[in-house]
Amino acid sequence: MAAVMPQLTNPLAPPPATSRLLLSGNEAVARAVWESGVRVAAAYPGTPATEIIESLARYPDLHAEWSVNEKVSMEVALGASMTGARSFCAMKHVGLNVASDCLMTMTITGAYGGLVVAVADDVGLSSSQNEQDSRFWGRFAHLPVLEPADSQEAYEMTKFAFGLSEQYETPVLLRLTTRICHVKGLVVVGEREAHEPAGFVKNPERWVMVPAHARMRIPSLFQRDETLRGVSEASPLNVLEPGSDRSVGFVASGPAYMHVKEAFPNAPVLKLGMSHPWPPEKMRALAAMCDTLVVVEETEQLLETEVRAAGIACHGKDVLPKMGELSPQVLLPAVNRLLGREVPPPPPAAAPLKVFPRPPTLCASCPHMGIYYTLSQIKNIIVSGDIGCYTLGAGHPWNALDTTICMGATMGVALGMDKGRGAADKNKRILAVIGDSTFMHMGMQGLLDITYNKGNVTVLLLDNNTTGMTGGQATPASGKDIHGKEAPRVDLAKVVEALGVPNERIKVVDPYELPVLFKTIRDEIKIEGPSVIIARRPCVLIDDFKPFRPYLVEEDKCTGCGNCLEVGCPAIHVTSREKVIKPSGKEVELAFVNIDNQACTGCGLCVQPCAPDAIQHVPRRDIPIHIVKT
Amino acid sequence: MSQNDITNILVCGIGGQGVMTATEILAEAAIAEGHDVKKTEVAGMAQRGGVVTSHLRFGRKVLSPQIEPGTVQVLLGFEGAEALRWSHYLRPDGLALVNNAKLVPPVVELGLFDYPEDPTGQMRAAGRRVVSFDAMSIARDLGEVRLGNTVMLGAIADYLPFSPDVLLACIVKRFARKGDQVVEANRKAFAAGREAVARQLGASVNNPAAHA
């Protein structure tokens, strides 16, 4: 243990009010949530929103949690709000799909304590299976939508949102995008305000959503829309900047506003901070002052359609892209062309030079490599997959994952394939791969469907004791809570058994033990009915992982067969290649390898397929100091 | 507002190399100098050995956070092929400072793609101003490979629109709690990074980030 040091200031205390901090949008939202006196904040990890709750967990005086999925996180926030507590939940765009069942009725009950839902759109798909425009939820659920354009605004709008929520008893959607969440900018922060919950008030007509009660409350949604339109019209969040060159004017929100200001600094702009309901009078005033109106929005053609429906002529997606991020260099040529102006030449950049792609890889010693190496060796299988690091199994060298749709989908997809297949797939075995965190998020129900409906599916449950893809967050099966403190640990094997998988069809294996893993999969896929193989090894990025003694390649023994490369480890490198003609007359390319012993953490996966036993432990004297276990 | 006020620094490399931390320290230095700052990453699933770029923009008032092709004053490359990948982001008078590291991904080892023979040579052939050096062996000579990032920061220190001392002060502040020995090692690494570039460029070269 380190020596005891006198602690002058608490390093964990939040920076004081009036501090000017370099914060990401996520960190800025977290700070504002804390300052707003929120008592409960919940989320399931998801890029680009993960760091909001991660930051909040470091603040005192509130309950922050990793919920098992986004729907539960929203229900937790709603329950807290029912007691009068201020509450918050955060999710990525696809998370709101999961939570939408709660959202669509929560909008009818409304909020009691201020309730803000942050939803982060992964515009440009940096780490998601699709691209979605969460602004639609504001229309669908009759909820106000706030759209900050940078970290300072994210901070200010979050604080504003809690007041708005309480004043109009409405949940508020805070729509973020990757370029808000993951951009750092300067933010001046303030004090935390105390906010004591007023207490739950028994009121079945409000909180018990049966048809008779909901029917009474639905008209209030339409009324609230109208009231909020008035708020929007008067709100300083919606600013009409008159500009000086009125040949073209813009409507923009979120990051799009910054791109407009950079590309057309002198044009009039209606900057929408509260983008739904939007202010019709301000919109008309803008339209009246400029010759051409362009609606600039990421990503879908939403506001533009509404503006046109209000009888205001405008352009938008006729000249701008409907997907991906906008930027000044996207706006400049598109708008100038629209205006019939000469398009200013882009900066004199040389064209990009061609460089190999560098897709994400599994880490050295990643237990998933054992799984995909093994699956790549088995013929006549269909492997349905899911969302997580293990989606990378679809890539090289394994090419061992055949489907990925959404969180937990692997189970239903596999069952559907089993029930739907005809003669073409009769002889194939169907497997479903899912991670531990995804299994608890939305996979358990799918497994129940497999057992209940007598599906013939072999499930590989990859238990790496964490939510790996988003950076290693705790789960109900990791025995830790969001603060890293001890928490009840769910036993996945027992869960699987409780969901109806016969005890003798539940196997727990070590994904580093390739022969056992191979045999277990081969045996289980031959047996009719559901099986679950739990492959258990900690993710290499979490504390539970302890590196082993690294390996090296004995140069004189390596025959260049390349078997080890099929494991897909990023620590194995080719030192030379050689073309040889085999006795059969077939030409093959040999690849002689070495192992980067700074990167190798000794899982031994590559040792097992090495035919000539060329991969050996590094001599003890050469072991890098970070290796603690041999 | 004139975009000439804005300094664009692009830092690129591979997940795990320290690209984001280096950019964070550069951002702190710009803030210490009174600039408005925006810093953004295109990381995606970079934790898993993928491409990472960190965009740093600073000046009187920064609007759009992303840097666009052809507008970078200084490109700080943590890896040769990655510097080559992003070299079209440089302005014609921009400067690329590139660590000679060669990190070869599995797709290349599998023989699906080729790693460029001489990435910095290819950049020079395309008319880029490039200084390349081996930050890791400089760090190793100083006794600790983890000093590589500070060597990288030293390399860019003379090509910022403010004094190298501002950047050094931010590095010192970051390591202060680790004790004098660590601070001293980082000072040496910083100086070695500056020297590695100066040795090749000489003092006469224009600083592309200096505002007229």
Image (cartoon, helix red, strand yellow):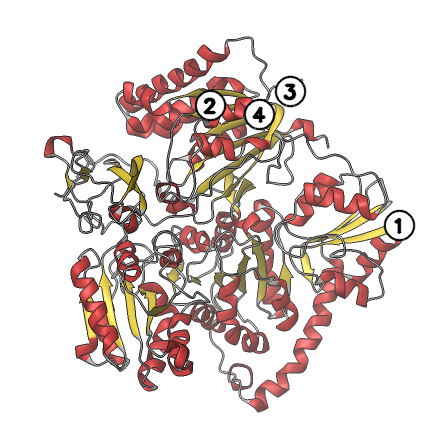
| Discs 3 and 2 share one subunit | yes
- Whether residue A393 is visible, yes or no, is yes
Task: Decide: few, some or many residues near mark 2? Use Cα within 10 Å; few <14, some 14-19, many ≥20.
Answer: many
For the N terminus of chain B, the image quarter is top right
Task: Decide: few, some or many residues near mark 4? Use Cα within 10 Å; few <14, some 14-19, many ≥20.
Answer: some
- Callout 3 amino acid: His
| SS class, disc 1 | loop
Give the residue number, with chain letter if any, for mark 2: B167
Tell me the distance, in whole angstroms, between the alpha carbons under discs 2 and 4. 31 Å
Give the residue number, with chain letter if any, for mark 4: B126
**Sequence-first tag of 3 and 2:** 2
Q: Is residue A5 left or right of residue A424?
A: left
| SS class, disc 4 | loop
Instruction: State whether residue A379 is above or below residue A13.
Output: below
Tell me the distance, in whole angstroms, between the alpha carbons under discs 4 and 3. 25 Å
Give the residue number, with chain letter if any, for mark 3: B211
Give A265 or A218, whichever is nearer the viewer: A265
Tell me the distance, in whole angstroms, between the alpha carbons under discs 1 and 4. 44 Å
- Whether residue A491 is visible, yes or no, is no
Which residue is most to the bottom?
A212
| SS class, disc 2 | helix
Q: Position of residue A607 (x, y in %)?
A: 18, 47
- The chain identifier of the residue carrying mark 3 reads B
Residue A561 lies in quadrant: top left
Give the residue number, with chain letter if any, for mark 1: A291
Q: Position of residue B107 (x, y in %)?
A: 39, 45
**Sequence-first tag of 4 and 3:** 4
At x 46% / y 29%, what residue is drawn?
B77
Give B47 or A35, whichever is nearer the viewer: B47
